[in-house]
Structures are given as C-alpha cells and as structure tokens.
Image (spheres, helix red, strand yellow):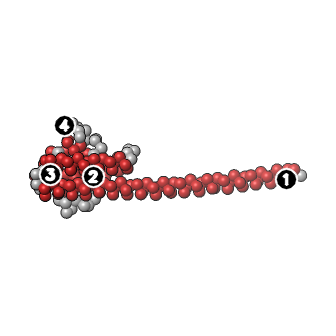
Amino acid sequence: MMDLVDRVQVLRDEVLDIVAGGSEDAPAVAIFDAVVRALAVGVDTAGGLDLTLHDAVARRLAWGDSEESILSDAELVFARLARAAQRALRDPDEEMLVLETAALVVGGAARIVALAAVARSGRDRAAALREDLAQRRLKEALAEQQRTLARLEAGRAF
C-alpha cells in the first residue's frame, strides 16, 4: 500500500499544477494531502473525519474564501488526479482505489463546507431576527415618545 501512496505522492505537482517546490499555500494542497493520508490509512478507515482537512477548510472559510471556491478546488483536484492516475498507474485496481479514495475525500470536503454553510446560515438568521427585534423595540420606543410629547403638548395648550 505504501508503494501506491508513494506513486500518488509523486503526482502531487502535476495534480496541483504548481512548479516543483511550489507553494504549500496553494488552495488545493489540503485536499490532495487528505487523499494521500486516506490512501495511507486505507479506504476502509478513510471515511472518517479528517481533522487536518476540516481545519484547512475552516481556515479558508475564515479567511474569506467562498464555499464555491473550495468545492471548485476539490473538483479540480479530483479531475486532475483522475487523469494523472489513469496515465501513471498501470493496474486498474490501483487506479480505482485512488479514485474511490479521492471521491471519499472530496465528498468529505463537501460535507465540511455544507456543515459550515448551514452553521453560517443559522448565525445569519439569528442576527437578522435580533436586528428585527431591535428595530421593533426602537419603533415602540419612538411611538411611546411621540405619545408622551403629544400628551405634554396637549397639557401645555390649556
């Protein structure tokens, strides 16, 4: 299995489309590295939560990357890895294992993004409800002030 991991690791620069010795900050690096980690532990256990991938996705979201850009990067890594694996791996079983593992990782990344989007939408909805409540209270306070001013004006008129 480690032989396969090493052969997939060699495809890293090609899949990530970076020059040799390229940036570790490239957006798709975390996804590719998660595929390599999943291959190293085996496809049977790769379906679990990859905390490193989760942290990388959360960090990108925190820095302002959109959910769409993260999913686009994951899709691009999968497509490039599929082409590279087809070219570089001669054994169809190994190619299928790499594709299955990559699909699990990309699905996991999509799940992480979806959960983050749901959590954000919940926070956004709560913030909107708080704003509506504050606006309603402000309107009630202004209406009460207008009634008080009207009553005071009416009392001064006599």
**Element at badge 3?**
helix
Q: Are marks 4 and 1 in contact (CB under 8 Å)?
A: no
**Category of crowding for the residue at label 3, using alpha-carbon neighbours closer than 10 angstroms: few (below 14), some (14–19), many (at least 20):** some
Q: What element carries label 1?
A: helix
What amino acid is found at the position of numbered circle 4 in the picture? Ala
The reply, left or right, for residue 152 in relation to residue 4 is right
Give the secondary structure at mark 2.
helix
Dot 1 or dot 3, earlier in sequence: 3
Q: Which residue matches tag 3?
A: 5
Identified by mark 3, the residue type is: Val
Q: Which amino acid does label 1 sit on?
A: Gly
The residue that appears at 20% across and 55% down in the rendered structure is 99
Mark 4 = which residue? 20
- The answer to whether residue 24 is above or below residue 129 is above
Separation of marks 4 and 2 at Cα, in angstroms = 23 Å
Query: Which label's residue is closer to the chain start, 4 or 2?
Result: 4
Q: Residue at label 2?
A: 52
Question: Which numbered tag is attached to residue 155?
Answer: 1
